Amino acid sequence: MGLSAAKNTLIVGCGNPHRRDDGVGGYVIAQLESKLKKGSKIKTLVVHQLGLELADEIKNFDQVIFVDATVKQHKKSWKLAKLASEGRELKFSHYLDPSTLLRLVEAIYQKKPIGYVFSVSGLSFDFGSTLSPKVQKAADEVVEEILRLFGAQNA
Amino acid sequence: MKETIIKPVTRIAGHAKVTLKLDENEDIKDARLSILEFYGFEKVCEGKPFWEMPMITSRVCGVCSMSHQHASAKTGDAIMGVDIPPAARALRELAQAGEVLQSHALHYFYLSAPDFLLGDQLLKGGIFSIIANKPDVAAKGIKIRKFARDLLFRLTGEGTHSVFMVPGGVNNTLSSKDRDALLSGIDEVIADIQFALDLTKDLHLKSKAEFELGSFPSGYMGLVNERGELEFCNGKLRLRSNTGKTLEEFEPKDYLSFVEEYTEDWSYVKFPYYKKLGRPGGIYRVGPLGRLNVVDKINSLLAGEELKEFKELGRNGIVEESFYYHYARVIEMLHIAERIKSLLSDDLICDTRIRTTSKDFQPEGVGVVEAPRGTLFHHYKVDETGKIKKVNLIIPTTQNNPAMNRAIMEVAKSHVKGQKLSEEFLNRIEAAIRCYDPCLSCAAHALGQMPLVVELVSHRGEVLDGIKRG
């Protein structure tokens, strides 16, 4: 996979916290923040959606991990994937997908942070600020996985 | 008659289809921009208390949520019959400025820049090629937008869909620490906008023909203050003709005496017009070009000078070509950045008296603001307990709908020859639509992204050709 604990890393939680499982990104970041050591190489951020202004932030990192809900149902409830460096043609109106955002960073700032995404299979996207129990369990597993990957110097 | 259909249009918000009809001689007879979404927000709001409306209606749109919230809060002020405290008025103006700035920056630097920076090269390299060729321009767009988003976040605690403006005032104060942080960044924003303005003027000098895209006569509408200056939050509505004559100047609450809407069975978006001139003569345009055409002056130093230069490009101070929306948009960005600096420099902005209230409800209220894309109307009727009986929302893109149809027609007349459509033509049609920065989600009160389909249809109804994008 190539994810490196030594790299300067930004973890971005995406989603709407008022639409139940869509808020899983924010939940994961909140859990991580309570467990990360001071001076950790990991920085965190929570956003509703990916806007192009994020490019200015992302350019400062070697590695970016996005955490987001998906309507796709993964076997294990969540999945970690490396983002393709070659994306589709840029199509956006007011928000971007993670691959497009990374391509934008490369085009503007000539920086190539490596991108990963933890996608968590959502079960309910109805109104509400709580995660469904199965998704909360998956989110806790994602937190543990990130802490495991980044080792003792960060957590 | 033959017909061309473009579906879906790209780099705008929502879904749309363009149909071009040819006559027996294969000349363009009609052009229709059909909006294919339906949401019905006005109906959803019935029965809700009016004080919840700013929060509800901000969900109409993720781009101009603050404008909806502002128009809704002003409608609530009118229902309560209150004048809000001066600090609340200043904070509302600051939030409105933040939204217009972030929306204009995205549209100018990313959604429309390829149209005037790359032209037909866009077909070869795509938007990434423009970014790679002009990374300094792209980076400035990001910086401006980041500043505006930061302003909104510091002011409201949210990037979008905040609960900031309420009937009677606002919910949050601005700390002096946040004020100072914002002030420290505003001069760089002003400099970046001046760079964009110089770039636009340079392109205008080099390729005036490009700027002549989508030219036709129409009326124009926007808010003005008592000195006839550019205004986004208060004042009267002014309607001007294409000859520069002021046709009307009226209180927003009286809008129904001047504006009427009609519907077509091929689009979910209505077609507003100036009542006295009827249709099609009563077509009017709103948004950056509409606003700059109706004002006499801009009350900020740098943008005020730019307006004088801009007005000289037209006749009697009226600039008609749709492509000048982009130029007008940058002048507005400059004015807004200057206003932000002025508002932040006044200690009133940190005053903590930000809300007033009343339990004596009027049966109806109207609230009008200038959203990024133009004049936004909210009109509510309530019962004695304040519950909504009826809602009327007139959205900027709706008001520009007849004009967008007309702009498409003008482009089609000069570009469509025979029964085939070219990529270059599709690009020009899209460029004409994008001048208006349409938010079709707003106009149909719907959600979605906007790709475009064009179809060319004969006078007998046969589809002769079609192009799809998105």
Image (tube, rainbow, N blue to C red):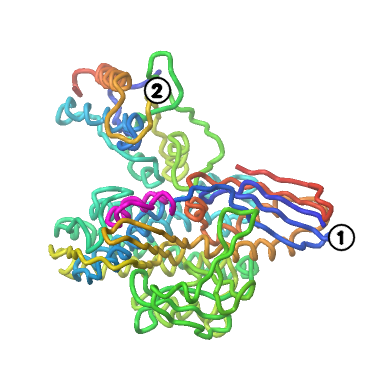
Q: Is residue A154 visible?
A: yes
Where A65 sits versus B111, above or below?
A: above
- Asked if residue B328 lies left or right of residue A153, the reply is right
Does residue A134 sit above or below B360 in this rendering? above
Between residue A75 and residue B213, name the one nearer to us: A75
Chain under numbered label 1: B
Give coordinates of residue B85: x percent, y percent.
18, 69
Residue B102 x/y as whole percent: 38, 56
Q: Magenta residues: mostly which secondary structure? A: helix
Q: Secondary structure at mark 2?
A: strand
Q: Dot 1: what SS?
A: loop
Q: For this rendering, which residue is in front, A74 or B297?
A: A74
**Disc number for residue A121:** 2
**Residue appearing at x 25%, y 61% in the figure:** B167
Mark 2 belongs to chain: A
Identified at 18% across, 26% down, the residue is: A36
Q: Quadrant of the C terminus of chain A?
A: top left
The magenta-colored residue range is: B42-62
- Mark 2: which amino acid? Ser
Q: Is residue B47 above or below residue A112?
A: below
Residue A16's x, y, as percent? 34, 37
B341 on left or right of A119: left
